[in-house]
Amino acid sequence: PAFAGHRRWVARCGGATRARSVANGLDELLRRGARPGDWVLVHDAARCLIRPEWVDRLIDACLDDAVGGLLALPLADTLKAEQGGRVGATLARAGKWAAQTPQMFRIALLQQALAQANGDVTDEASAIEQLGHAPRLVVGALENFKLTVADDFDLARRLLETRA
């Protein structure tokens, strides 16, 4: 929330898209003294059950990486492609991972990726991939799920009760 020796501050730099919000946030970090080579972790507020040890695992795995990386989970479920409300095909799950956040990249690389990204990026890693880089996959956690529908909130409440 603050740089060493500085008071905490709140950045209000949202945008029309996730990519624009992140780009605005990176600009604000640089304006406040961050350097282009500094690492930044981007986290989705909808993944509000994040634990410090998961963030530490990502940082430890990526700190010496040339690109950076993200928390993710190898897919365990069988994948189906939908066609008209029916199964159109079964997709191979081998080698497939579900992306999570945080995602960790150097500011300058992420700025470049977001500036050059086409409209179909859904996270920072996909923008980095479009530059030709391969972000590191770091095993995340099932509890680091995205709260999207009512059932997600019920599950989150129950999980938080077990943490108390």
Image (tube, grey):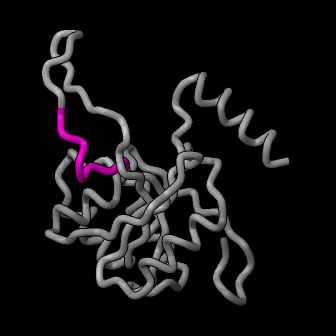
- Number of marks in the image? 0
The residue depicted at 33 percent of the width and 70 percent of the height is 136
Q: Quadrant of residue 71?
A: bottom left
User: In the picture, which quadrant includes the N terminus?
Assistant: bottom right
- Magenta stretch: helix, strand or loop mostly: loop
The residue depicted at 17 percent of the width and 10 percent of the height is 84
Residue 97 among those drawn in magenta: yes
The residue depicted at 64 percent of the width and 30 percent of the height is 153
136 w.r.t. 83: above or below: below
Q: Quadrant of residue 132?
A: bottom left
- Identify which residue, 155 or 25, lies in the foreground: 155
Left or right, residue 154 beside residue 65: right
Left or right, residue 63 beside residue 156: left
65 w.r.t. 144: above or below: below
Identify the residue at the far right of this view: 164
The stretch in magenta equals 91-98
- Identify which residue, 149 or 42, lies in the foreground: 149
Identify the residue at the far top of this view: 85
Q: Position of residue 164 (x, y in %)?
A: 85, 47
Left or right, residue 97 beside residue 45: left
- Identify which residue, 31 or 22, lies in the foreground: 22
Q: Position of residue 157 (x, y in %)?
A: 73, 34
Q: Position of residue 33 (x, y in %)?
A: 53, 85
Residue 104 among those drawn in magenta: no
Residue 152 appears anywhere in the view: yes
Q: Quadrant of residue 85?
A: top left
